[in-house]
Structures are given as C-alpha cells and as structure tokens.
Image (tube, coloured by chain):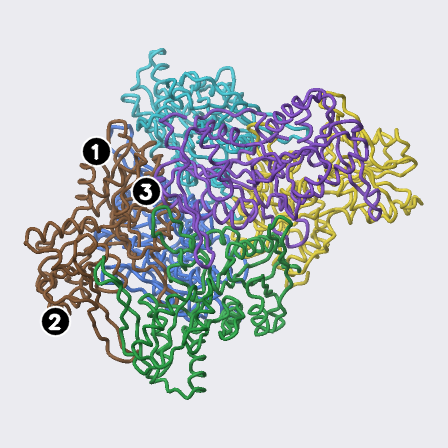
Chain colours: A blue, B cyan, C yellow, D purple, E brown, F green
Amino acid sequence: MDAKDSKVLLFKLTANPILAEEVAQKLHLQLSLSEVDHFADGEVLARPLCSVRDQTVYVIQSTANPVSERLMELLVFIDGLKNANAKEINLVIPYYGFCRQDRITREGEPITAKLVAKILEAAGVNLVITMDLHSPQIQGFFSCPVDALSPTDLFAQYYQDKLAKLGIATQDVCVVSPDHGSLHRARNLASKLPNSTLAVIDKRRPAPNKAEVVNVVGEVKDKVCIIIDDIIDTAGTVLACADCLFARGAKKIFVGGTHGIFSQGAADRLLKSKIEDIVITDSIEQNIKGINAISLAPMIAGVIEATEEGRPIPDSWMDFH
Amino acid sequence: MDAKDSKVLLFKLTANPILAEEVAQKLHLQLSLSEVDHFADGEVLARPLCSVRDQTVYVIQSTANPVSERLMELLVFIDGLKNANAKEINLVIPYYGFCRQDRITREGEPITAKLVAKILEAAGVNLVITMDLHSPQIQGFFSCPVDALSPTDLFAQYYQDKLAKLGIATQDVCVVSPDHGSLHRARNLASKLPNSTLAVIDKRRPAPNKAEVVNVVGEVKDKVCIIIDDIIDTAGTVLACADCLFARGAKKIFVGGTHGIFSQGAADRLLKSKIEDIVITDSIEQNIKGINAISLAPMIAGVIEATEEGRPIPDSWMDFH
Amino acid sequence: MDAKDSKVLLFKLTANPILAEEVAQKLHLQLSLSEVDHFADGEVLARPLCSVRDQTVYVIQSTANPVSERLMELLVFIDGLKNANAKEINLVIPYYGFCRQDRITREGEPITAKLVAKILEAAGVNLVITMDLHSPQIQGFFSCPVDALSPTDLFAQYYQDKLAKLGIATQDVCVVSPDHGSLHRARNLASKLPNSTLAVIDKRRPAPNKAEVVNVVGEVKDKVCIIIDDIIDTAGTVLACADCLFARGAKKIFVGGTHGIFSQGAADRLLKSKIEDIVITDSIEQNIKGINAISLAPMIAGVIEATEEGRPIPDSWMDFH
Amino acid sequence: MDAKDSKVLLFKLTANPILAEEVAQKLHLQLSLSEVDHFADGEVLARPLCSVRDQTVYVIQSTANPVSERLMELLVFIDGLKNANAKEINLVIPYYGFCRQDRITREGEPITAKLVAKILEAAGVNLVITMDLHSPQIQGFFSCPVDALSPTDLFAQYYQDKLAKLGIATQDVCVVSPDHGSLHRARNLASKLPNSTLAVIDKRRPAPNKAEVVNVVGEVKDKVCIIIDDIIDTAGTVLACADCLFARGAKKIFVGGTHGIFSQGAADRLLKSKIEDIVITDSIEQNIKGINAISLAPMIAGVIEATEEGRPIPDSWMDFH
Amino acid sequence: MDAKDSKVLLFKLTANPILAEEVAQKLHLQLSLSEVDHFADGEVLARPLCSVRDQTVYVIQSTANPVSERLMELLVFIDGLKNANAKEINLVIPYYGFCRQDRITREGEPITAKLVAKILEAAGVNLVITMDLHSPQIQGFFSCPVDALSPTDLFAQYYQDKLAKLGIATQDVCVVSPDHGSLHRARNLASKLPNSTLAVIDKRRPAPNKAEVVNVVGEVKDKVCIIIDDIIDTAGTVLACADCLFARGAKKIFVGGTHGIFSQGAADRLLKSKIEDIVITDSIEQNIKGINAISLAPMIAGVIEATEEGRPIPDSWMDFH
Amino acid sequence: MDAKDSKVLLFKLTANPILAEEVAQKLHLQLSLSEVDHFADGEVLARPLCSVRDQTVYVIQSTANPVSERLMELLVFIDGLKNANAKEINLVIPYYGFCRQDRITREGEPITAKLVAKILEAAGVNLVITMDLHSPQIQGFFSCPVDALSPTDLFAQYYQDKLAKLGIATQDVCVVSPDHGSLHRARNLASKLPNSTLAVIDKRRPAPNKAEVVNVVGEVKDKVCIIIDDIIDTAGTVLACADCLFARGAKKIFVGGTHGIFSQGAADRLLKSKIEDIVITDSIEQNIKGINAISLAPMIAGVIEATEEGRPIPDSWMDFH
C-alpha cells in the first residue's frame, strides 16, 4: 500500500496485538496508537491516540475469552472512532465470539450471535472481516457486508510443508471431519492434498434410548489422519476422535483447528495425548509450547488491500459452502 | 376464544385458503373477508374488506410457488393493514419460501431468507409463526419474534394411527433421515414411536475426485422405514433414499415431508415408485390424489390462542434442536 | 468516462438487456456479467458474476410485468451486491412499476408505490434514477435521492424529426393531453414545437348521475394531433381520445407514451386504429412491429456520467411540474 | 366513552383551543392541562401538566401559520409525552401545514410535506388524524397510519340546511371546482345535493406563449354556484372563479373551503366581493365576522372513539379519491 | 397488584438478587425463574425459565462491576425475552454503569453512557427505570422513556430516624455537598431536615499554576455534617471532605451515597476513618459490616405499580434538577 | 483549498450571512448561491440555487432567535440537498439553539436539545460542527459525529491584544466564572493569560429557606476582572456578577460571552452599566454599537479544511472538559 493509501489506519486492542502488528507490516503501515484502560471500578476505556478525522479505520480484535470484556472494548473503541469523525470503521474479528449461540435450542434462549451483530451495527460498523464462522448463516445476522474467510489455503500450505518435511506422501493422508457439520472443511482441505482421502466421524444413537455409537465413515487404517475442525474448545471432541481413529488403525494423527480456545485445560490434555501435531491459527492469541500457530496476517492484509483498492480476493479465501 | 376476544381477525390470501378456514373454525372465528386482485398489467392488489382499526390481525400465507407473487401479495396486504390502523400484524407463514437461500455459497449471492425477513419487517410485521424452518438460524434474520414450530407431534400421531391400522409394531419401524442435517427430525419422530430405531443416509465421496458413495448408517433390513424430511421438492433425494433402503432390505417405505413442493413432476414420480405412503402437511396447499396431508390447523390455532391469552405453548411444538 | 472512472460497474437483469447494453456503450463501458436463474420450485436467484468490492454499481431494471418477479430479481441482486461489499448501489428503474398505486382509493388499500420504495431501501439502495413518474409525490416515498427524469426532450426531438420528414409545419400541430393530470407533459412538449397549440380531453359527468360527456378543450380541427401520455396500458384512454379528436376534425393523430405496457391486446388495437404513428420509449422493452421506441440510453448515460463526475444535469431533463 | 375508557387523554396546544374543547365535550372528557411557554430568547416550551404514564394521548394541533412555531410546539410536546412514558401518542392535525410542498418543482427544492412526516415520526408519533390533505399521496409520506378525513359530509349538511332556509332547490345548484385537481371534492359534494350539477373552471393557455384563457366547463347560467376548494389562502383563485361565474350568468355564489388561511387580506377581499356566503371549517381557528365555520369536532370525536373502541368509521368520512 | 395484573413478570439476574426479591414481595409477586450460566469458554447465557409470551416483563439488574459481564447478561436476557415474544421489556437498572463516561474529555474518547443506551435499545428495551443518574442529560441518550428516580426521600427518612434516635436536632445538622455538581442533592436533602443548613466543598486552584485550595462554603463548626453524594467509588473525595470538615470544627460526620462501588479498598478506609455513619442504597448489592444500606425496593415497586396501573408517581421521587 | 478540492460547497442561510462569507474567503471559495423565501401563508422555502450532485456541502446556520424559524429553514434546506443528491451534508451550527433544554427539570418536559439532534439526523445530516455547547453531554444526543469547538483560543488572543493596548499586565487580571458550571471556561482562559488569577461567583442559600447569598471565591480587589460565560441572554447573571465584583473592589470589568443573544433589552442594560468592554463571537449575528464581536471564521474554516483533508485539528480548539 503506497503513500497515496496512507489514509488507512490500523488499530489493535487487547486481543490480537501480535497479529495486528504483522498485518501492519504486511501493509507497510505503522499500527496507529491506541489505549485500553480501566477505571478504578473496572469500567473499560479504549480510544485511538491519534486523529482519525476522515480516515478509513481497521480495528483488529477477536471477541475471545474474556468475551464480554473484549466485546465491550471493541464497542467503546468504535464509539470513540465515530465521535472523532472516522470515515469508515471496518472490523477484523478473526474469532467471532458467541458464534455457537446462533439459534434457539431451548425456550427463552437468546440468539447471541445475532445480538452481537446488531449491537456492533448500532455502534457503527461498516464492514466485518472474519474467519471460519461457525455457521455460514451468521453472515445474514449483519446488515453490513461481512467477508467470511476460510483458512483452508493456509492449512493446506501448512500440511504440504509438514508432510514434505516428514516425507509422507499425500496419498497416505486421510483428512477427517470430527462431525458431519464440519465436513466441508475436511473436503476442502483434502482437495488440496492430492490423492488424500476423506473420512467423517459419525456419532449417534441407533435409537433414541440406546447408547451412543461412534463410527468412522471412511478408511483410516495405516493412514496419517488430519482431524480438521473450526473450534478447539475443551478438546473433548478432538480427543474422542483421535481415540477412535487410533482404534481403527490410524498411524499418526495431526489436529488442525482454526480457533484455539483451549478452555478447561484442553491444551494440556492434547499435548499429553498421542496426537503428533497440533496447529491452530492466531485468531485467538495463544502462546502454548508445542502447539503451532499459523499466522492469519497475510490473508487479512490481502483482504484489506483488496478492499481499499477495489480488487477481488481469491475465491478460495472465501468460506463458501 | 370467547366473545371478548372478538378483536382478533384472521385473514387468508391465495396460498392457504383451506388451512385458513380450518384455523378459523378451531378458533370459533369467521375468516375476515379480503380481496386479492390484479390490474390489467398484472400488478397485484390485496386488501381487507372490513375495518381493522385497532384490531389484532393474523394473516395466513405461505410464500410458496409462485413465490415472488405470494410474497408480494403478503407485502401489499400488510401495507394495507398498516394504513388502516391495525393494532398488530401477525403472520402465519406455514412454508417460508426462499428458506434454502440462507447463506452465501458463491461470490455475489444474496442471502434471500434474510432479505425476505428484512422486507417483511420494513412492511410492518409484529410476529411470525412458521413451521419447520430449513435452518434454525433463519429465526435470527428477523428482529421481531418468530415462533418456529415443529411438526413432529403431528407426524408422530399420523404414524401411530397408521401403524396401528396396519398392525405394524413400532419396534419394527426404522425412522430414516435422508441426510445428516435432517437427523434431528428423524430422532424426534423416533422418540415418539416406542422402540423404533434410527438410520441416516450418508452420501459422500471417499476423496474429492472419487465417485459418490451412498451408505445407510443404521440397520434397515426387514424394517418398515419412515423417511422424514422438511422439504420434498423435486423428490430426487427421497427417491434415491428409497432405492438405497430397498436395496438394503427395507420391507416397506413411508415418506413424510413437512413441505410438499413437488416441482418437476415429483408427485408423479413418487406415486409411481414403490413407496407405500406419502404424507405431507398442508403448509403448501396441494390436492394430489394418493398423497395425504396432515392439517396444521390445530397447532396454528393453538399458538394463536396461546399468544392472545398470554399462555405458553408445549415445548414439543417448538422446533428446538 | 475514462480509465480513472473504471470503478463504475453497470449491470442488467432481465427487464432491459438492450437498453442496458446501449447505456454501457454510451459510457464506453462493458456491461458487467450477471446471472438470473431459477430453482426447481421457481425461486429466483440473481447475482453479479464479478467482484464488486468497493465499486460503484448501477443496475438497470424496470419493474414492469411480470412486476413481482422483476422486483424480486432486483431485490435479491441488491442483497448480493451488498453482501459482496459494493460501495454504492444505484438503481436505474426506467419504468417504476406499481406507480399508479400511489394513494388509497378504498378502505384497506396499500400504497404500493410507497411500499416498494421502502423495501428497496431496506434492501440497501443509495440512489434511484427513474423516468416520468406517474405522480411527482412518489419521489417523496424514498429517503434516498431520486432523479426523476422527463422524456420531453426526447419526444420533442422525435417529433421535430418526424414532422420535418413529413413536411408538416409545427404550427399545424396540436399537442393533446388525454386528461387534466397529464397536461404538464403536453405543455412541455408543445413548448418545444414552435407555434404548436395545446388541447386537453375533458371527460366528465355534468352531474353525478348523468352520463359521461367527453369534451376537447382547445381547437383540433385540421390539426395534426399528438396525444402524449405517461403510460399506455390497455390503450383504452388513447383510443377514446383518438375517436374524439377525429370526430372533431383532426387530420392526423400521433400517439406518444413514455411507458408502453400494452396489456390485453392494446398494441393490436392501436395498430389497427387510424392512429398514424405510435411511439414509446424503451423503458419497457418491447419489440412490436409498427411501434417505434425512443432509446433512453443517452439520457440515462448522461445522468450516470454527471453523477459520477459531480456535474449538474440539464434542467429540461428533470421532471419538474 | 365510559369510565373504563378514562385512560384516553386529550390535549390542546395553541392552534386549536376551541376545537379541542369541543372534541373533549363530544367525548365526555375534560381536556387535560398543558402549558405552552417561551423563554426570554423565544425558545418554545410545551408540556403536559398531568401524568401521562401509560395513557393513550391525543394532541390536537394544526400546523397553520405561524407554521414553524406550531410545528415546533407539537414536536417538543411529543418529546415530553414520550419522556413521560405515554403509551400511545396520536396527533389530530386538522390542517397539515406545508402540504403544498409535496413535490419538487425546481432543482434543489425540499419535499417539505415529506420532511415534516419524517420528523414527526422521529419525535415519536403513533397515529395521525388529518383533514382533506392537499394531495392523497401525502399519506404515503408517513410510516405510521394516517386517517385522512374528508369534510364532504359536513359541507353537504351545511349546504342542505342553508339551501332549505333560503328556499333554494338543489336542482338549481351547480357545484363548481376551481380547478381540475379539486374536481373530486365538487363531485362528492354534488352527489349529496340531489339533482345538482357540476362544473369546473378550466384555466389554460391555448399554446405555451399565448395568454391564459379561463373557461367554465359546465352550465352555470342562472345557477346558484357553490365553489368548493381545499385551501383558501390569498383567495386569488376563488375570486377569479367568482368573476368568471358571474360573467357567465351565475345567480348567486357560495364559497366553501376546508382550510381558511386567509393570508394577505384575503378575508377582506372576499367579504367585499359579491360572493354571498363563505364557509370554512375550524381546522384553522379564525374569528372573522361574516365567515362561517363548520366544526370538525363531531367528526374528530367520532374517529377517536372508533379508534379507541376498535370500530370502523363511515366510508364517507374518509378522503378516498 | 391483584390477580388480574398477574401478567407482570419480574426477573432478577446476578447483580441484585436480594433487591429483586424484595421488589417482588412488595408487589405480591413471585420472582419468575431465570438462569444465568457460562459455557466452558466463559461465554454467558441468560434466559427466562418460564414462558413470557405476551407478558409484560421487568428485569432488575445494575450494570455494576464486573460491568461488561453484567451488561452482557442483561443484553442476552433481553434478546431471549424478545425471541420468546414478551410483550414489553422494562429494565430496572438501579445503578447505571458507565454513567461517568457521559462526555468527551479527550480526543477519541467514547461517550459510553450513550453507547450503552444505544445498544440496550438495539436489543429491544421499552422502558428504563434507574436511580440517581450521574448527569441528568443521560436520560436524553435513550429514545425510550427513562424514569430517572431520586433517592432523596429515602435518605431523608433514614436521617430523620437516625437523628431522632441519637437525639440530635435537625437545626444542628449541616448537609454538605462534596462538590458544586452535587449541590442539588444536598439542597434537596436539607429541605427535608427542618432548619438544617447547607455547605459545599469548594476545591480549586486560585490560578492555573497554583496549588489547589480546599474551601468550605457554609458554616460547619459544631455541626453534625451529612456529606451526600451519588457515587462512592474509591472514597477519595469523601475522605478528603471529611478531613476538611473536621478541620473546620465539624462535630460528627455522616456519609450518604446512592451508589456504593467501594473500589480499591474504599470500604476499609471509610470504616477506619472517624466518619460516624456510612449509608448507601442497595443499588449495588454489597454486604459490608458497618455500612448500612437503604432498600430501594419500596420505591421501585411503587414505580412498577404506577406504570402498570397508569398512575402518576410522586414528584419527589423524580430526579428533577 | 486548491482546485482539486473544488467539490466542497458552502452555503449560508439567513442566520449567519457575514460569517459564512468570511469562512468562504478563508477557504478561497465562493459561497454557493441559495434562496430562502416564504409563501403567502408564511411557510418557509429554502434551496440551493446550484447543482449539489455528488458534492460535499457545508451549511452555516445558527439556530438562534427566531429559533423555530431558523431550525425549519435548516431542515428544509437539508431535505432539498438530499433530494438533489448531495454526497455529504455537514452543518456548521455556531450557536446550537435549545441547548439549555438538555434535561428534564419538571414532569412532562421535553429534552429539546436531544429532539433537535434527532430531527436533524432524520432530515439527513452527516456531521455537525458547533461552538461552546452549553453542556458537553449534548454531543451524545447525536448519532453522527459532532465537532464541539471551544472559543478559548479566540478570547485569549482578543484579551492579550486588548490588555497590551491598554497597558495592563496579565498578572493584574482575574478571570471570573459567573457560576460553578462555567468554571472550565474561566480556567482555560486564565491559563492563556500568564499569572492571571481565577475567581468564581458563588450564589447560594445557606439553608433551603434562607435568602440567597452571593460570594466571590477568589481575590478580585484592584483587579481587572474578565467575566467569561457561554451565553449572554438577558444579561441578568453578568450584571449581578459585575455589581458584586465592583462591590469587592474590582478596578475594571470586561465581559466575554460566546453566544450573544441579548434578549429583553440586555444589550442596552450592559452598555449603560459600568462594564468597560463587552465582547462576543459572531455565532449569533448582531450589530450592536459598543459590543465587539470576534469572528469564528478562521476556526470554522480551519475545521472544514482539516475535515476535507483528513488532518487533525488542534486540541485547544476542542471543547474538552
């Protein structure tokens, strides 16, 4: 982005400082200064430390745990930007918190993923760039445009490199979806690993009152299995999958997850397991020894650049399914 | 609903005249008069033929084929109600058209299910009552409350009666979901047919470039299979399922679908097949010899009554999953 | 429009493909690719086939018969543009359907011309360019700017050429308004044909229960009469006018109408009548042998260019009255 | 309206104190107390002097001259009602000021009749009841319901009484519209005076550059003419009509106008003319000796009562045309 | 509130369970059941555990520390209520968090008190009842009605009782405002303690670069001083006031504060000081030995009752100044 | 602003023609032509006399007395700009009328400062630039950005010049705030007059029923006092201050007020008093012999320029306190 594009300002808040820095570097920009502070009673204050008058602003902030705090930071920062007469307020929300609350499962429940969209828009958002939304319908909860990105290209690159380094041929790889809802992720990844195969874990009760039975649909024996999911939270699903795959003869297991939440000691349990490689993206900033993180910076920088220059972005970056 | 509740007016438009009549009867109301007409150039005009001043109005209209026409009818009718000072405009949309356009699958696509929600609200809707929404997230596309109902109770009653009449025990029944996304429907129905079992059709490619393989997960041999789905459109899915089930030894096949669209000769093909019984609800008004229709009138009337009297409706009527 | 303006994209949908092509040519642009398709059950899908990220988009589509279909096409296309992050969505609606539903004439009626404005805005429109609105108040139904254009200059040019070719002097011409509401159109046209005169057809009952009497106010004997109206729908009005003018000694009759709907065999009846020349604009795409069509392309292209370059458009192009 | 309906509060502001009092009497209500005051620098303050908590409120105020002042009074009063938690805020605006600014006649003009609708709604209005709107499309400028009333029944009663008293038979009466746009008013009135006839004043240039010619379409010789119009402002139109009618042999002339603005000495000029009787409604409060005023109170009270009790109002009260 | 009013439901969330219980008792209602829970990753879920269909709902929740969490709880609960078709959603927010962020003091700052109003309204609030707002303008940040209550009556009762018990005459009392902005609170309280006097602490620099000087405007020697403020946060202000008053000969010091935040060890410091009596309301639920809390329940219950029955509330309960 | 920036148009209406002219000069622009007119019945019409198509427009208009008229002028002008497709509508409102109605002081009162913000936004405003708002919270009544400017720099320059001319040293100056609410103004001014001191007039009753006592907090004996306030309306406050200051030995008194309303003969009374110098800004256009006016043009032009060029404005120009 050359001098003429200097009117784009990029801000970080507390959730993704390293990612924000990397995006800025890719765009040959300095991160603009901002401040996040708390009053004695815990109320948050966030504000830009430079003029945003008539500038196009991008703010990078995942609404990950502590999610209410992070969301509030973002909301007050947006309000400050608007008061200070920013021209456009664009959000990069690598992990969109509350995404699993996207429907009503019991009487009286909120649809929080919709509510958050509504209040971000009430605060004054023009564009949202986000990664691997839990369900594609969430895009429809916003009135403003949403760039719903897919990490498949990044994971494909990661595994191509890793497999090459380990001397594993892609035809020995089986990409595994931990459930039916995530199948598109596995299918997309497999399509980028030539001759790899596809499997899905099927977990269901044969009849409503019977015990749950876990099946693997697809052949995994002697395969290097890559389990690919959107969210690794308590890691319960992934660990159960791994057990099941090993039981069916899987040779090695790699695990890839877009959003690494790792609550309730999940990281420890994963690291202690027989899983050989765990990789997430930096949508949620973590620093866990033994867990690799793929940087989203190149893709986010690419989308910002394309948006500012009015150019398309590659179809494979979009999360269409 | 007694005389004191006479301020509730119920209207039909062109999509569901019979259902509307039945709902009115259940509520001990007369359907209020309305008119749907077209100008020489085809423009639609719809309006109430009685005063709606300060009345609570319910309009029953599925947005089924011709969907743009039906939607426009509904929109102009709402506008007329609003102009005429109706107190509340509540819609009963048994089949919510465009529901399958609930996400973006290719660059530039609309999210039409969201768009329709937005324009109904722009026209002035207070409440939407609908049946078996294609995806539960659609509820979040509306800002007004949406009663998303489930037909499971109605199908359960239908099949209990039918099985009893045919002398088939429920333990000989296997409820089959035609794909993973519809599994909750099959599970709910099975839970109301004691000792019945559950199966799901799994259709997938073993690897991205391989031919699709169809599996039945669950035992169907010698079973009376009930395939249950939300929408029967071209019936391609259902017929392929049936073939597959017969191939695996199913004894008899019944098919239940909430919304019977039957496009491209689907009804004929179904009737000519070996499927023994086809049942839909009257969410889309059809009159096809050989295809049964369960009336939604009792459930819709129940929800209207509960809403007017501020009472809860049974949890099993709600489409939570 | 030079290279620097390449960020303007122009799309057609199904209503005005030829006009759209001509506008593109005038602007030295290629029409951008789009797709309009239907699902098995008739639901419409429309989408751009190129990236519109940060582009200013113009969509050309009259909401003429089948009007609900055309409107829905436009709405879903707008939604797709918005989702894909278009910068500005401007509509060119040469014929604004439902324009005659601009007021309530009976209890319970919609004001559909207002409703359509509201839902277009709910979908996300920034600017509307339209031609010869049935009533000027319709502009006030929109919150966004509306360029309400007048075709008078185009008709004036057409008739000057035609009269010259036929060797008819403009002082032998009488411009006739078919009713009082259209008088401004006739007056404007007459003012561009030097020394022409003006007449109006007055159709009324002398008392509420008496038979209707048709009068011609103004002298038409031995005149070449040009009847000018906004909409030719069933052509009933125009044919009655013509009879009346011939009865009063008109020598020749030409008919000009901005929007040629021609429903219920209107074109046939007009062509079989003694009317010598019938001309419409291409606001509604027709291809009827014997009926001429004036292209709106130069004027529409002019307005788009002026808008993009921040220049005024000629006062005579605006429909002020 | 009985005790149970005591939750309806009726307020006056400065424009129609007498009419408001009469409406209250018809409804067997006391006018609720309010205050309109000005600060030293001229800023207006208006507020209710009683609690409106959870009450349905009607405010009676024409936005007549001084129109900005009256509108501002109304706006601040609405804001106060809303702050004080009124349940519903309904406006009775007998004369809707700025109604003639309902379209753009020159570049850069506002559509003030739309603007006023928008800001009343921004302030928080639920229902508008108004009388004889200058153009019926204005109703479409509001999103909330508008009861657009017609004074024809009231004028009919007035003239029936007057003619009876003067011993004039209705077949000797000709109802005259001062221009084509007002013809529906004359037609409606004539239909209530048995055997009366109808005429319209036609004022136009035979060609764009010629002098204007005034015609009377219809027979007025020896007739008692009733000129009926919506607004009497400078009275220029009415006086010119009267001259023209006398010149064509009219025996007597009565003038009826819904809204009596009487600017620039209009009342004087009318009273000094040969016009025999001038009658307006009290939509704009006037007290001019020699000019009669018909009370709108019974009709307004009727509409309020019907609205509160959810009953229809007579079709002849509505301004459909 | 009798059986007929049973359609009012009252909910607590986590901030004010005891106050909510007391309000319910005053209204002879049972608190309706609700649930506040967290997912593994910390996301909050709050929902009613009973049907709210067509019910009027009151939710009692201060947005006190942890303020973002409490606000989010409230927002998701509102969303659930709305989805479940509640008729009216009324909030009782005894302490309105972020109230001190009511203006911009440095470039780029948010106006968080406005932002919170906006997002509560986006979520769907109909009425807000709150206590002793930090600045009266905050009421204007809401579009919905706000009942801004004053605790003066409650403090007056407390001090009358206390002084009587201690045998102190009110003429020996001086009510002290800790700064000029809080003077109206002190004035209101003093007016309810006959013959008490008034003082204000004036803290300012004599010139911009000089040291701050603290003055007491008013006579406090040998007086029993009651310092009255809206918020006691770090207690810095109150402790400095007390020092200053003792230095000027005050005999005893009582401290009253509407909202007891007590951050950074404030309670301890207050309890260790020579201040004789500290009283707050239960707007923020605390349980600190040695600090008294006045219940807001009677006043809140009174306002709810008045709102449901359409009756006024006493002027002295409203925070007008 | 060079040729490339020629797309900025600047308009005046009736309130500030001279100021607008000066701002235009500073920006090297011609004021664009506009028209403000009234119809016979007093209705206002305001419109631009040039094309604003796709232009960024600034309109300069204080809403000073006659305030409703001036506000209406502004609203209709905005509507016209919007209809004519202006790109951005920015308002410069040097004096924001109704600013003192920023809170509710008695039951039923409007918050007119909020209402005006809401209706300006309903009309379609993008940015407001205003001067010395009566309370900083008013900024939060707007959803669009508000540049709330401070005149301190301008007053400081004025007094530095004046004192230099009169040979008065700044250490002999005491800047006086007429009440506690205005103290920040006095403090800011004093900080720019080296070694000047600060005083505040304290007016209060020692007890609720006692007579008011006026104190001067700070030393004014033998000082040249500058009383600085935001609004001079009836001048009652300022004159009482002056009396009090002279009584305490002030040598000379200067008065500075941002907004000179001068109602009820205020100017005369001030000029007849012993006050030596009175200065206001030209936020409200006055032409009173003996009262100086500081031009806001340089500051307003500076803010417009900064906004158009995306540059910050000096912190000292912003009204942060």
Viewer-proximal residue among E220 and E66:
E220
Q: Residues within 10 Å of mark 1 (few under 14, many from 20)?
A: some
Badge 1 and badge 2 both on one subunit: yes
Figure check: E282 above or below F271: above
The quadrant of the picture occupied by the C terminus of chain F is bottom left
The residue wearing badge 2 is E247
Asked if marks 3 and 2 fall on the same chain, the answer is yes
* Side of F156 relative to B160 (left or right): right
Disc 1 chain ID: E
Q: Nearer the viewer, mark 1 or mark 2?
A: 2
Height in image: E119 above or below C235? below
Residue in the foreground of this view, choosing between A292 and C117 = C117
Of the residues shown, which amino acid type is indicated by label 1?
A: Leu
Checking the image for residue B57, the label placed there is none
Question: Mark 3 or 1 closer to N-term?
Answer: 1
Name the image quarter holding residue E57. top left
Q: Amino acid at mark 3?
A: Ile
Residue E29 image label: 1
Chain for disc number 2: E
Mark 3 falls on what kind of element? helix
| Nearer the camera: disc 3 or disc 1 | 1
Q: Are marks 3 and 1 on the same chain?
A: yes
Which residue lies under the disc numbered 3?
Answer: E78
Report the chain holding disc 3: E
